[in-house]
Amino acid sequence: MTLATVPAQHAPAGSRAALSARGLSKSFGNFQAVNDVDIDVHHGRIHALIGPNGAGKSTVFNLLTKFLQPTAGKIMLGETDITRMDPAHIARLGVARSFQISATFGDMSLVDNVCVALQRPNGLAVQFWRPLGSLSRLRPRAMELLGRVGLADMAARRAADLSYGRKRALEIATTLALDPKVLLLDEPLAGMGQEDVETMAGLIADVARDCALLMVEHNIKVVADIGHDITVLQRGEILTQGSYAEVSADPRVREAYMGAEDDD
Amino acid sequence: MTMILGMPLPVLTGQLLIGLINGSFYALLSLGLAVIFGLLRVVNFAHGAFYMLGAFTAWMLGQYLGIGFWGALLLAPLIVGLVGAVVERTMLRRLYDLDHLYGLLFTFGLALLLEGLFQHVYGASGKPFSAPEAMKGVVRTDFVTVPIYRGWVVIASLVLCLGTWALIEKTKIGAYLRAATEDATLVQAFGVNVPLLLTLTYAFGCALAGIAGVLAAPVFQVSPTMGSNLIIIIFAVVVVGGMGSILGAIATGYLLGIVEGLTKVFYPEAANIAIFIIMAVVLMLRPAGLFGKEY
Amino acid sequence: EPYRLGVLTDMSGMNFDLSGKGSEVAARMAVEDFGGTLLGEDVEVIVGDHQNKPDVGSTLARRWIDEENVVAIVDLPTSSVALAVQEITRQSDTALLISTGGSSELTGASCSPSTAQWTWDTYALANGTGRAMTLEGDKNWFFLTVDYTFGHALEADTTAAVEAAGGSIVGKVTHPRETSDFSSYLLQAQASGADVIALANSSGDTMTALKQAEEFGITAAGQDIAGMLLFLTDVHGVGLEIAQNLTLTTAFYWDMDDDTRAWSQRFAERMDGKMPTMVHAGVYSAVLNYLKAAEASGQATSGSQVMETMRGMDIDDFFNRNAYLRKDGRVVHDMYLVQVKTPEESKGPWDYYKVLRTIPGDEAFRSVEQSACPLLDD
Amino acid sequence: MTDGSATPREARGPAQLRVRGLEAWYGESQALYGVDLDVYPGETVTLLGRNGVGKTTTLRSLMGILRKRSGEIDFDQRSILRLAPHRVAHAGMGFVPEERGIFASLTVEENLLLPPKVANSGMEMSLDEIYTLFPNLLERRHSPGTKLSGGEQQMLAIARILRTGVSMILLDEPTEGLAPVIVNRIGEMLTALKAHGLSILLVEQNFRFAARNADHFYVMDHGVMIDSFAVAELPAKREALNTALGV
Amino acid sequence: MIVAEDYETVADSRRSHPAQRVLVLALIGVLLLLPLWVYPVLLMKLMCFALFASAFNLLLGYGGLLSFGHAAFFGGAAYVTAHALKVWEINPEFAILTGVGAALGLGLVIGLLAVRRQGIYFAMVTLALSQMFYFFCLQAPFTHGEDGIQGFSRGKLFGIVDLADSTTLYYFVAAMFVASLFAIWRIVHSPFGMILQAVRENEQRAISLGYSVQRYKLGAFVMSAGFAGLAGSLKALLFQFATLTDVNWHMSGEVILMTLLGGIGSIAGPIVGAGLVVTLQNHLATSGFPVTTVLGATFIVCVLLFRRGIVGELRHRLPAWRRK
Ligand SMILES: Nc1ncnc2c1ncn2[C@@H]1O[C@H](COP(=O)(O)OP(=O)(O)OP(=O)(O)O)[C@@H](O)[C@H]1O
Ligand SMILES: Nc1ncnc2c1ncn2[C@@H]1O[C@H](COP(=O)(O)OP(=O)(O)OP(=O)(O)O)[C@@H](O)[C@H]1O
Ligand SMILES: [Mg+2]
Ligand SMILES: [Mg+2]
């Protein structure tokens, strides 16, 4: 099986990263979960963050989106320093994220789930005096997004009734609705069936053309196929960075993460 | 006479001690509330009613069976605990799978029902109840005046609080209970008889309120509304301490008792509000409460 | 259609013991004693529980008046409800016979020509106790005052009476309503060295304070305690052990003479042996006298005319001594300063008071000059 | 439903777990429509199927966590359909849920020690053995359970059951979200458990992992079993599986 | 999440059916004619409480926040309106505006503190803060303690229309009532209402979509406080008094009962519930049953057996009602 491989263009030299962090650190009490991490995510490129469980990948995500407050370090979104902003504000600046444990609006239909995400970018967030009909212009787009993740035929179901894998797909559709400048996906493919993995990976590769994309993923095959830049994290620190070929050749990475990956 | 902050020393130390005594009741009640909340995720609005039930049971035991204070101290909490167990078994447990707020609403109704019933049967002005003969009288020294009975209450409540804390934080039962709070089904799937555990917990929390009621009977008027006046203060104590934190409930109970006692000296008009002001401040600075953790 | 008397009371709340069911019984007794008919029509007693909510009380009162031919509304515990209902009866000119409601406002600035405040008011209790006790020799007073309008009014009235009688105020402390612990306040009161500690608060607070005063051995150490607002049922509630030696003012005590005993026995038979409080006796007396006055005035629809007739009547009975109805609605009658017996002195249940002195009505109640009632102006 | 390898399996004696005609409902909506399933002693059985076909629901029904169901469930020749979940556990069945179910208010070690010993199958591990198997847990043993990373939590969830002495484990997607090294380690662990004689009912999306570890396979679709075959038949089934699962 | 089990999702009611419009118009018609048969004061009282419960439901049913302190806004506004009418002697419309303004202000203060917490914590914090406000009202001289503010005239609306006549007052109250309900309905079924529901469902997710959830919750809280205040002001105008009962926490409990009894999360639920509780209170007043006990028992039965409330149960039982 093969995936539509995106040609790996190199980041234009000297181009500013869409999202970058310097010296990012986070400790929980005495425990140093993330230590002095530098990371750059460029427009049009997929940056994969991999590493053993507990390496601090989700924590880095939470720091970048300010769901956690870094103990040290600086985060820049293009020219803007976002180190001190609150998470909703950062989201409004165009940084969208998904959650490792899926987060959906359980009691709402799938299409409403996506509509909610579409409302703010379309300037329909605080109008308590306008009828709901004003939202109907968002529906075609919402349906389109659901279609992209293969959920169009269940658009009217309650999100809470979905199986685990489909919730993850919904979550991605919702995230895409923000038309983000920077997209952060935490294990987007976890819990998906093999077939869906392929579609979804294709989708991610597709989306990444128009934004900067950082993802955490344990599915090495997908990472190899669509990732441009790879950062390997171990015990909160960067073990190595580079292309998949470079990184996977590193014996430290093989030992810490991939194990004796058999190639059947 | 030594003066501190414009107060004679005996008055000041006296107030501190009295604050501690009130704190004992706060601690005991908020402890029970915290145990029930911590493990069942039910805000037991009926806690004040169970406290009242404890006091009334003590009175009834004396009135109809001639059982004295010490007997009542033993029996009344058992009876209150039993009532709690029945309530849990027959009604409360149907609400566990629902939003926690339904537990609050249910116990609110229960509180109204119990208070209404007692008011209907025994009237509003309450019943007399006195301390055991051996504990009457006052200790007077240069710095304090303490009724003996109250001194005893402080000690009893300390012992109960620490005992409960040890039971929950230091034993396996405690671990089951804490785990069951988060995912009762799973704990049950591990082979623990969770339904029984929950019944016992609710009964235990209610029994704690019952003990507080018996202890309070000689100090406060035994009346149907004695608990409803207290319950909101206890809520504030639990919020300040950090919901579900056993230690937080105990420490904050004593602390607020003392703070309240001091307000009564320096600015009595604000004594009722003091607790709420503290609560507001704590909420602004530490939304999870003094001892609370944010998960 | 029969004439109806509506007993509007508290059947489920904190006034249940002192008024509640007993008020209903007393009203029924009065109607029976009167013969059960008024101006040739039957008289019926109906009862409403206002739940201490003014809106429930006033909605009910309105319905009674408009739809159920209620000619007089009786009892009215809780001053906010009493004031609200008084507005309604003033508009419809219905007789309002207040026995439990004790706010001085009812016959003060808010007075109404169709109202009679029968039994007591806060002024009378405060003033009666303050004056009488000071005359008995308790010169130095310390106040424990509940911190809202009611408590401040009680305190002010008592202070005036104490000072007029030659006493002085040595200190005071205000406490919030529904305080569960009075020990700090009591210690301050004790430290003040006053002769009397006056409890300017009401039922629940008063009882807790009494209980804790006993606990701290305050009375044992020689200070007197005066309750500004206490009913017989309150004393029954705390028990003699705790209430003993407490001094207070009351409009009625069942064990004063043969008349009071005879009526009270009849009452107790219908109330499982509970003796009447002053408001129960007041309800009886108010209803009976109202019926007499209505009969005499030849009509029952205009409350103010019935009251006018009553003003010309002799309204003395076992409850009212030297009584008359004033223009502001105040029924002026003798009050009594009583002391609570010790457990040793008491011969049985409900044997609680010994009468210290009789306070003549004109001395006990607010004078016409002091009243803010506009009806007194003309 | 085909059962190609009936003879060798049944030669092992009576099935340890025997399920016939299991139906289950979430409220009004039916999720299982007559599921048949056998697990023989010491066997590792894998349940395959796309998202939302009812794999998790099957496990929850077996454990008795999902109460609204009908059919036959026999465990060690005893019906457990009517038993409360804690009784099922005492019959010797252990459960590792999909969402892991790590307790936030307990430390890692408390989480480990939480499940009581329910049976004496001789397969229980000591704490030391567990820590040797999962050194990450040793390192973080005093942190609150949910402060572990997703993968660490998964290890903890499995490790927790190993102490209790159950004779059968229901494992719901144990490799979900795990790094390849850890997946390998869990594979080794399953082999070790099997060597101990434990029976395992595994729900898996990771087909490669399942293929390496299982003796027998079931395939589910829309709440029914559509296929059942032994590991030996796997090569022959590849094509069919490809269409059924998109493997 | 505390919602009626068959919660009317925003999407369901997106299109208002023509039949619904006819029904609403018919109901308004009935409202206009009702004083011909029913006692107007009772009707007005019902409307005040129905509005109060609807305001409460705006927060609970659609925002998922259970406030145990709504009496503060209801009673607080009643006090301010009463004071404005009695002491400042301003026109009733301004008195009501001041009352609502006070409720909004109080809502902002209490809301700022309370929205930091969720669920049960939120309930307890609002309870405690409103109790603090109760003590303030008890002690502040302008409320006249136990007596309350009593005996003022209703004044002339815009200086022209005399409200002393209860039929005139009735139409004024009815107009305010219908307008407020429409406003609440509009808020719930608006883009804002949609986000509010999303926040209720999953706060973290809503944040990650760029919504400042605290502001949405605060917004809903303040709006709810404002409508509760309007209900309180109207009640003060109607009865011509404002007393402690309306700021007491029992009132907060009662409004919860009304909403729960009628059905959470629908427009009709709180109205039905309020009607029932008020009627029940009036009826029990002369029945000889102990009121608190009966209310307590009703509460328990509702929570255990009829969580959907009357309206919710009806909808559930009569499938024809909820045409798809
Ligand atoms: N709590 C629930 N309430 C209602 N329906 C549910 C619930 N949980 C699952 N379902 C439905 O039951 C069906 C089976 O779900 P189940 O979770 O068993 O699937 P699964 O095979 O485990 O899928 P996955 O691989 O995605 O975990 C699905 O259609 C799902 O939508
Ligand atoms: N809130 C927290 N408090 C304390 N420790 C934490 C907290 N969140 C994460 N940790 C710890 O920080 C480390 C990194 O966790 P993180 O969730 O970032 O790992 P991860 O790389 O995403 O792992 P996985 O691939 O398993 O999801 C873990 O050891 C975890 O226990
Ligand atoms: Mg992670
Ligand atoms: Mg599953």
Image (cartoon, coloured by chain):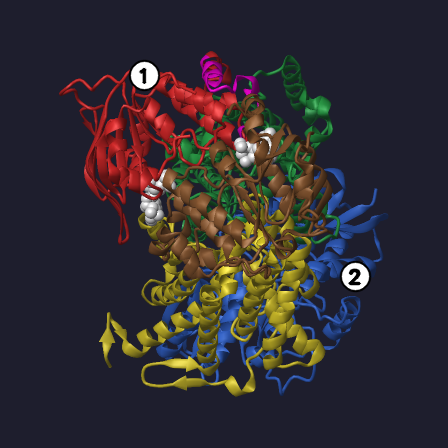
Q: Is residue B118 visible?
A: yes
Residues rendered magenta in the picture: A141-160
| As drawn, B226 above or below A41 | below
Q: Is residue E216 visible?
A: no
Find disc 2 in the rendering and name its residue. C29
Colour yellow belongs to chain: B
> x%, y% of residue E260?
61, 39
Query: Tell me, what hue is chain D?
Result: brown
Q: Amino acid at mark 2?
A: Met
Colour red belongs to chain: A
Query: Tell me, what hue is chain E?
Result: green
Q: Answer with left or right where residue C135 lies relative to residue A26.
A: right
Find disc 1 in the rendering and name its residue. A6
Residue drawn at x 30%, y 29% is A48
In the image shown, does D17 or B147 lie closer to the viewer? D17
Which numbered disc, 2 or 1, marks the residue closer to the eye?
1
